[in-house]
Amino acid sequence: MPSSRPKRGSARKKEYKGPLISGWFPREVPPSLTDLLDDAAIQRIIRNAEGKKPIEWQLGADDLRIDLIWCFNVYRSHVQFGSSKLAKSRQKHLLKMAEAANNFVRLFEGKLSDRWCRNQIAAALHAKIPESGLPIEKVLSGVRMVHEIANSAADPESNDYAIYHRKSVHSPVEEIVRGVLLQTFERHAGKEATRSRPATGGQADSPFIRFAVSALAELNIRPPNGGTYKPETVARALGEPAGSRRKTRRKKR
């Protein structure tokens, strides 16, 4: 009978070569987080998720570690997106990018001397990449597009602003619980993430809820007042509109 415990593979502490989550691409793993999620931490998460019923884990412990570190990175991104101070900083940087792109294009236009410089650069580019025609036009076209996108993303009145400076109605913890943390559990446990509760009431419980509570604690993601997140917090975050496949299941006595 196969073991329910993930097999330990070779350590991968610098580069993510395991499964991807929702299209995320490999990145370098922060050493401090790799140290935080050591083998003992991963085994605690596994044991807590299983409870009294073993789970047939689909991937190795190292892959689980890497995916959980990604969950932490996504959490940090949501924290940053929810910060007004950081949003203003991003807006200023986008305006600088738009200005720099505009100035770059202007250097290739205007006076005769400017055009001479442009022609020299165009000739050099054409010599290096002869099959592309006059690549300087493509370069300038791309830079003009950078100016347009950066300018639009920095403008509160534009549609792009809401995309680049989105602020979710959910907290950062709720975002990862209902997003990448849920995906991580389903990928590794090979089962759907659900909520369950005794028919007579009581605390929400399920393998995913136990997995999420334990993973958040090991990643040192904690409530503002300290302590650890409770099962009810995870259950509320997992809640979705009627008709969703995420269901609350009542346990039979």
Image (tube, rainbow, N blue to C red):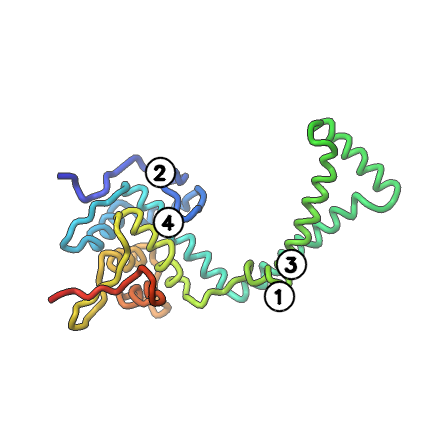
- Tag count: 4
**10 Å crowding of disc 2: few (<14), some (14-19), many (20+):** some
Residue under pointer 1:
156
- Residue farthest along the right direction in this orientation: 112
Residue contact between numbered discs 1 and 3, judged by CB atoms under 8 Å: no
Q: Is residue 248 left or right of residue 34?
A: left
Please give the residue where the numbered disc 3 appears in the rendered image: 152
Query: How far apart, in angstroms, are the residues tagged by discs 1 and 2?
Result: 42 Å
Q: Position of residue 202 (x, y in %)?
A: 19, 71
Q: Give the secondary structure at mark 1.
A: loop
Residue 212 location, quadrant: bottom left
Q: Tell whether 82 sits left or right of 4.
A: right
Is label 4 in contact with label 3 (beta carbons under 8 Å)?
Answer: no
Q: Earlier in the sequence, mark 1 or mark 2?
A: 2
Q: Residue at x 63, y 60 (%)?
A: 154
What residue is shown at x 81% (from left), y 35% (from top)? Answer: 119
Q: Give the CA distance from mark 1 to mark 4.
A: 33 Å
Q: Write the residue at 36% across / 59% down.
A: 178
* Amino acid on which the number 4 mark rests in the picture: Ile
Badge 3 amino acid: Ser
Q: According to the image, label 2 marks what residue?
A: 12
Earlier-in-chain disc, 4 versus 3: 4
Q: Nearer the N terminus, badge 3 or badge 2?
A: 2
